[in-house]
Amino acid sequence: MESYIRFADNLSAWFGKVFAWSVIVMAFGVGYEVFMRYLLNAPTAWAFDLAYMMYGTMFMMAGAYTLSRDGHVRGDFVYRLWKPATQAKVELVLYVLFFFPGVLALVFAGWKYASRSWRYLEVSSMSPANIPIFQFKSVIVAAGMLLVIQGVAQVFRCIITIRTGTWPPRGDDVEELESVLQKEGADALRHGSEAIDVVEPRDRRQ
């Protein structure tokens, strides 16, 4: 199970980091459009399509990467108070009941949606440039399949945690701001208590 978790995490991270470069393409397109529209008074016909396709691609393809790093939004005001084994049991039930049915529905519906678009080489009906979008719709299927692969790894994580009482380690290339602040607060508290320990003996001698 641990080897599969590493494989899925690495795969999700690779795709997430590769498609993160979409934001550079999007920024270039938007910047070029601003330059052409406001300085040369010659707006482009394709900048809007480029922006939403790049943003949508980055958002979809980063889903599995975010899941592997436990970065999705969670209402954890109660969750954080539970023991890891309890957290894992609840997550396991939720993966089975909600995650996999939803993601598999995304894959199958997306396949039907994308294959129909490929058959007639669909172009954007909202674009004066008639930008092709059939390839963009294939991202739905790819993102869904990555989520399935990563979802299996998350289930394995839950099983290991139920057995051991400790969550398996995750990649350390990203970290929640709240976790960073909690660590800094704990460090400050620890250093403060150490300073008190050093000062107290001197006070007693006085």
Image: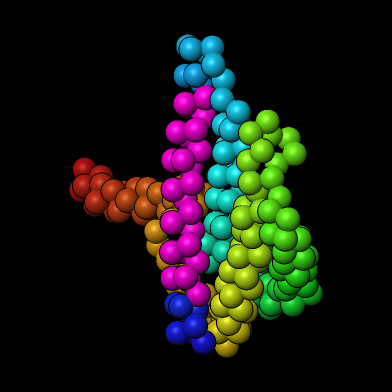
Towards the viewer: 18 or 3: 18
136, 101: nearer the viewer: 136
> In the rendered view, does 22 fall on the left or right side of 75?
left
Q: Is residue 97 shown above or below 173?
A: below
Residue 106 at x, y = what percent?
A: 74, 65
Residue 147 visible in rendering:
no
Question: Is 41 on the left-hand or right-hand side of 76?
Answer: left
The quarter of the rendered structure image containing the C terminus is top left
Q: Is residue 10 above or below residue 124?
A: below
Can you give x and y, in whole percent of width and height, for residue 124 in the image? 70, 41
Q: Let me know if residue 34 is in the magenta part.
A: no
**Predominant secondary structure in magenta?**
helix
Question: Where residue 57 sits: x, y (%)?
Answer: 58, 51
Q: How many marks?
A: 0
Residue under the image location 58 percent in, 82 percent down = 156
User: From this viewpoint, is residue 136 visible?
Assistant: yes
Where residue 203 sits, quadrant-wise, is top left
Q: State the residue at coordinates (75%, 39%).
A: 125
Point 55% across, 84% down: residue: 160
Position of 185 compared to 195: left or right?
right
The part of the chain drawn in magenta is: 8-33
What residue is drawn where x is 43% and y is 64%? 14
